[in-house]
Every structure is written in C-alpha cells, then in structure tokens.
C-alpha cells in the first residue's frame, strides 16, 4: 500500500525512525486539500480546501506492519483514509492520515511551514520519535 504524507512524515529521517527503513518515495500532491498548522503542535493536519493542492511525499510499498507502526506514531488524533493523489501527472490510490473526528477544530487555518519545522523543530522531533521507539 502507498501512503501520502504531508507533515512530519515527508522527512525521510522521520519515516526511517518510525519504520526502521526508508521505503521508496516520490513527490505527490493531494488536490483540494491543504496542510494546516495544528494549534499548539509542531505538525499539521489535512483539511479540505477547494482549489488548493497539498504537496507531499508518496511512500510506496508499505506493509501491514508498517501501517501498524504508522498508526501508533499518528496516535488517536489522526485516522487513515483512502484518497487519490497526483504523482508524476498520474492519479494513484493512497492512504493518508487526517484529523480524527472531533479533532478538526484544532486546525488553525494557517499553512504549515515544513522549512520552518526543518530549521527549528525537526531535531527535537526526531529525538522524541526515537525515544518512543526505544521503549
């Protein structure tokens, strides 16, 4: 199965920390959606936005064990759903994590800034992911 990532999982080092491997990946986008900042968190959530394209990464060939590890990483605030993404001009089925029912109001409406996250939050985020994995 393929997974469209638009937040912290766009960073290969985060995916590797969660799965202990780096699956094949390629750029992709989800039409009519935006990655928006989650209030009080360093990561985004996905929200429907007509005419907007959420840029991200398509991680290919994930196993059921990979998806279980990703479910644990995402926690109760996010749920998986099936979508169709655009990858190299072609539409492809994929899974994506979206805010779980009842968590949508936590989105601020401001776009998430992956470059800012890389500069100021990625190192600490990776430490916390690795610490959780070691438990």
Image: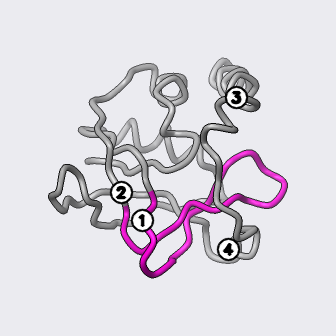
Q: Mark 3 or 1 closer to N-term?
A: 1
Q: Mark 1 or 2 closer to N-term?
A: 2
Residue 76 x, y percent position in the rendering: 65, 57
Residue picked out by circle 2: 29
**Horizontal side of residue 120 vs 97, given as left or right:** right
Residue picked out by circle 3: 119
Q: Mark 2 or 3 closer to N-term?
A: 2
- Residue extending furthest left? 90
How many numbered dots are placed on residues in this image?
A: 4
Answer yes or no: do the residues labelled 1 and 4 have beta carbons within 8 Å? Answer: no
Residue 83 x, y percent position in the rendering: 33, 67
Residue picked out by circle 4: 104
Q: Residue at coordinates 52% horizontally, 48% vertically from top-left?
A: 71
- The residue closer to the viewer here, 125 or 31, is 31
Compute the Cα span from label 2 to label 3.
Answer: 23 Å
Compute the Cα span from label 1 to label 4.
Answer: 18 Å
Compute the Cα span from label 4 to label 3.
Answer: 26 Å
Q: How is the image coloured?
A: one colour
Residue 35 x, y percent position in the rendering: 56, 60
Q: Mark 1 or 4 closer to N-term?
A: 1
Answer yes or no: do the residues labelled 4 and 3 have beta carbons within 8 Å? Answer: no
Residue picked out by circle 1: 53
Compute the Cα span from label 1 to label 2.
Answer: 6 Å
């Amino acid at each position: 199965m393929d997974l469209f990532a638009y937040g912290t999982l766009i960073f290969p080092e985060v995916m590797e920390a969660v799965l202990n491997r780096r699956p094949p990946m390629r750029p992709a986008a989800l039409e009519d959606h935006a990655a928006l900042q989650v209030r009080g968190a360093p990561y985004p959530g996905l929200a429907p936005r007509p005419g907007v394209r959420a840029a991200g990464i398509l991680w290919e060939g994930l196993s059921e064990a990979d998806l279980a590890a990703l479910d644990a990483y995402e926690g109760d605030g996010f749920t998986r759903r099936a979508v169709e993404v655009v990858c190299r001009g072609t539409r492809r089925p994929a899974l994506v994590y979206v805010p779980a029912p009842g968590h949508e109001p936590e989105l601020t409406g401001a776009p998430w800034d992956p470059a800012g996250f890389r500069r100021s939050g990625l190192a600490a985020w990776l430490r916390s992911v690795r610490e959780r994995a070691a438990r």
